[in-house]
Image (cartoon, rainbow, N blue to C red):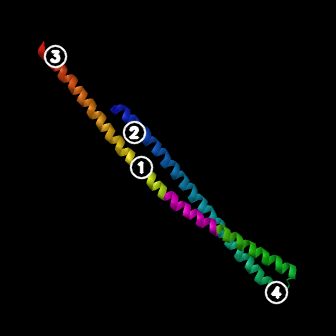
């Protein structure tokens, strides 16, 4: 295979690997954003839960709660707790996804570096081949002018 053809193939491989690495990096950034959003939502729910508990305790201590109000406030607290549990599970899943994508990104980065090295080697070979060809032409010209 010609060096220039091989060089073009390696350049295409490197471009593809760079694109794949960049796409993985974008997915990782998206995961981090999703995790941050979930953590903010979790904190908000936590504050809401604490406020609902405080209101519930205050109303109970005042002794002015009807059974319906008591059940409604307790259901509200339970719903917030369920939302908190669901968000916590989503955070855990997102953290696992972050770890997987980080490992994938490391692999893609390694593959891109390998392509870089291959490309540099191919460029050196191409340059060496060109220099060799030019030297041969110069030698032929020198020999031809010497023969005349």
Q: Which residue in the structure is indicated by mark 3?
A: 144
Alpha carbon of mark 2 to alpha carbon of mark 4: how far?
Answer: 77 Å
Which residue does the image show at 12% across and 15% down from the upper left?
147
The disc, 2 or 4, on the residue closer to the chain's N-terminal end is 2
What residue is disc 1 on? Answer: 111
CA neighbours of label 2 inside 10 A, class few (<14), some (14 to 19), many (20+): many
Question: Relative to 10, is 98 on the left or the right?
Answer: right
Query: Does label 1 or label 4 sit earlier along the sequence?
Result: 4
Q: Is residue 142 magenta?
A: no
- Which residue is disc 2 drawn over? 10
Q: CA distance from mark 2 to mark 3?
A: 38 Å
- Dot 1: few (<14), some (14–19), or many (≥20) neighbours within 10 Å? some
- How many C-alpha atoms fall within 10 Å of the one at disc 3: few (<14), some, or many (≥20)? few
State which quadrant residue 89 falls in.
bottom right
In the image, is 126 to the left or to the right of 90? left
Give the Cα separation between the discs numbered 3 and 1.
49 Å
Contact between marks 3 and 1 (CB within 8 A): the answer is: no
- Label 2's element? helix
The residue where tag 4 is placed is 62
- Residue furthest top in the image: 148
The alpha-carbon separation of the residues under discs 1 and 4 comes to 67 Å
């Amino acid at each position: 295979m010609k060096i220039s053809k091989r060089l073009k193939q390696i350049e295409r491989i490197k471009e593809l690997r760079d694109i794949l690495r960049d796409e993985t990096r974008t997915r990782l950034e998206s995961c981090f954003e999703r995790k941050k959003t979930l953590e903010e939502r979790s904190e908000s729910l936590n504050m809401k839960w604490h406020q609902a508990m405080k209101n519930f305790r205050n109303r109970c201590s005042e002794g002015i709660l009807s059974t319906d109000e008591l059940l409604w406030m307790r259901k509200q607290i339970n719903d917030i707790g369920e939302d908190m549990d669901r968000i916590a599970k989503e955070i855990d899943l997102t953290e696992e996804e972050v770890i997987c994508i980080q490992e994938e990104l490391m692999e893609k980065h390694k593959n891109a570096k390998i392509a870089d090295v291959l490309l540099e080697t191919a460029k050196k070979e191409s340059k060496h081949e060109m220099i060799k060809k030019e030297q041969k032409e110069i030698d032929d010209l020198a020999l031809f002018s010497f023969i005349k």
